[in-house]
C-alpha cells in the first residue's frame, strides 16, 4: 500500500472530484437493524457506484476508487411525543384508497441532509484534458448525480452557482486536497475507528473473558453515569457522564455471509435469480465524526469496498 500526500491508499488517483453541498431530501436514516442516523457507508458507496455506471456512457474509462464523506447538515424527521422520552419517526400519511379507507404504508425513517463527497478519480484520458474540458467533465458528472437517488432520498437542485463540482489534480504532498477540505468547512468527516473498538474489546476481555465485540460496541455507544470519586465512604458524591474520545458513533460497515452460497435460482423470491445467493448479517464497527481541518498525514479518510469471497465478507474500509 502506497502513501501519497500523507493519505494512505492502494493506488494514487489521477484526480479528486469534489461534489460540494449536495442537498438530499427523505434519505433512509435506518442504517441497520441496530443503528439509525446518517445513512450507512454501503449506501454512500452504492450511490458512487451507480454514479460511475451512469457516467461510463459518456466517459468509458472513468472510475471512482474511493470516497470521503463530509456532512454539513442533518435533520432527522423525528419528534418527541408528549409525556415520553423516546423519539419517534415522522411517518407519511398517504391518500385514502378507492374504498375510502386509510391506505397502507411502509414504516420508514427519513432525514434531510447536506453533504459533500470527495471521489478518487482514475481515468486513462484525464491528463489529456485541458482546464476547460476538466471543468466541463466535473459539471457533467454533477448533473448526472442530480438524477440519481441517494440512500433512497432525492437530490435537490442547488440554490446558487457557487456549489460547483470541480476536479483537482492529485499531488504527492497532499496540499491541494488539504486546501479543498478547508473550503468545505463547516462540516464533519466520517472516518473509521475500528482501532478503538479493538482496544475496547481487549480491555473488557482482560477482566471478563466472556465479553464479545457486541458488548464492547454497546459499552462505547451507551451513556454511562459514573461517580466522580471512587471513595465508598464519601457522604456526597457527584455523578458525571463518562467522556468519549471524540464524536464516536456505531456504524454498519458491510455484510458477512451466515449461510452457504446457493446456486442461482435455488432460493425462492430472491431479488436476482441469475446470480448466486447467500444469507448475510450486518457487520458493525465504530466511526468518528471529525472536522476536516484536524486531518493529518496519518488520517485515513477515504472509504472503499473490500470483498473476500472465501470468507463471505463484503466490507467498507477506510484507506
Image (tube, rainbow, N blue to C red):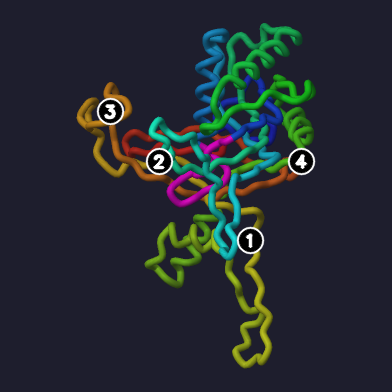
Q: Earlier in the sequence, mark 2 or mark 1?
A: 1
Q: For mark 4, give the secondary structure.
A: loop
Instruction: Report the magenta residues as a range.
Output: 26-41
Residue 307 percent coordinates (x, y): 41, 33
Residue occupied by mark 1: 244
Residue 80 percent coordinates (x, y): 60, 56
Q: Nearer the viewer, residue 278 or 197?
A: 278
Q: Residue at x 66, y 92 (%)?
A: 235
Query: Which mark lies nearer to you, 1 or 4?
Result: 4
Residue occupied by mark 2: 255
Residue occupied by mark 4: 186
Query: Which mark lies nearer to you, 2 or 4?
Result: 4
Say whether marks 3 and 4 touch (CB < 8 Å): no
156 in relation to 138, above or below: below
Q: Residue at x 51, y 63 (%)?
A: 219
**Disc ID at residue 276:** 3
Q: For mark 1, give the secondary structure.
A: loop
Q: Earlier in the sequence, mark 3 or mark 4?
A: 4
Horizontally, is 280 left or right of 242 in the view?
A: left
Q: Is residue 2 visible?
A: no
Amino acid at each position: 500500500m502506497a502513501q501519497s500526500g500523507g493519505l494512505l491508499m492502494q493506488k494514487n488517483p489521477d484526480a479528486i472530484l469534489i461534489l460540494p453541498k449536495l442537498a438530499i431530501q427523505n434519505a433512509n436514516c435506518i442504517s441497520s437493524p441496530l443503528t439509525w442516523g446518517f445513512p450507512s457507508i454501503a449506501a454512500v458507496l452504492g450511490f458512487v457506484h451507480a454514479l460511475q455506471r451512469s457516467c461510463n456512457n459518456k466517459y468509458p474509462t472513468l472510475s471512482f476508487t474511493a470516497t470521503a464523506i463530509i456532512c454539513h447538515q442533518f435533520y432527522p424527521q423525528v419528534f418527541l411525543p408528549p409525556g415520553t422520552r423516546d423519539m419517534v419517526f415522522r411517518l407519511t400519511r398517504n391518500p385514502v384508497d378507492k374504498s375510502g379507507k386509510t391506505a397502507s404504508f411502509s414504516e420508514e425513517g427519513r432525514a434531510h441532509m447536506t453533504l459533500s463527497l470527495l471521489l478518487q478519480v482514475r481515468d486513462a484520458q484525464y491528463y489529456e484534458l485541458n482546464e476547460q474540458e476538466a471543468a466541463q467533465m466535473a459539471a457533467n458528472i454533477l448533473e448526472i448525480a442530480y438524477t440519481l437517488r441517494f440512500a433512497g432520498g432525492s437530490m435537490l437542485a442547488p440554490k446558487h452557482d457557487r456549489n460547483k463540482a470541480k476536479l483537482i489534480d492529485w499531488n504527492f504532498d497532499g496540499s491541494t486536497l488539504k486546501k479543498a477540505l478547508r473550503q468545505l468547512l463547516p462540516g464533519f468527516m466520517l472516518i473509521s475507528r475500528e482501532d478503538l473498538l479493538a482496544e475496547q474489546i481487549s480491555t473488557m476481555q482482560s477482566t471478563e473473558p466472556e465479553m464479545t465485540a457486541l458488548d464492547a460496541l454497546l459499552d462505547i455507544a451507551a451513556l454511562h453515569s459514573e461517580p466522580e470519586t471512587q471513595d465508598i465512604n464519601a457522604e456526597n458524591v457527584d455523578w458525571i457522564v463518562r467522556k468519549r474520545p471524540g464524536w464516536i458513533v456505531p456504524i454498519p460497515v458491510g455484510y458477512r455471509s451466515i449461510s452457504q452460497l446457493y446456486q442461482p435460482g435455488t432460493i425462492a423470491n430472491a431479488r436476482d435469480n441469475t446470480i448466486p445467493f447467500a444469507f448475510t448479517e450486518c457487520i458493525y464497527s465504530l466511526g468518528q465524526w471529525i472536522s476536516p481541518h484536524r486531518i493529518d498525514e496519518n488520517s485515513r479518510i477515504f472509504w472503499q469496498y473490500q470483498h473476500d469471497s472465501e470468507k463471505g465478507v463484503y466490507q467498507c474500509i477506510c484507506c
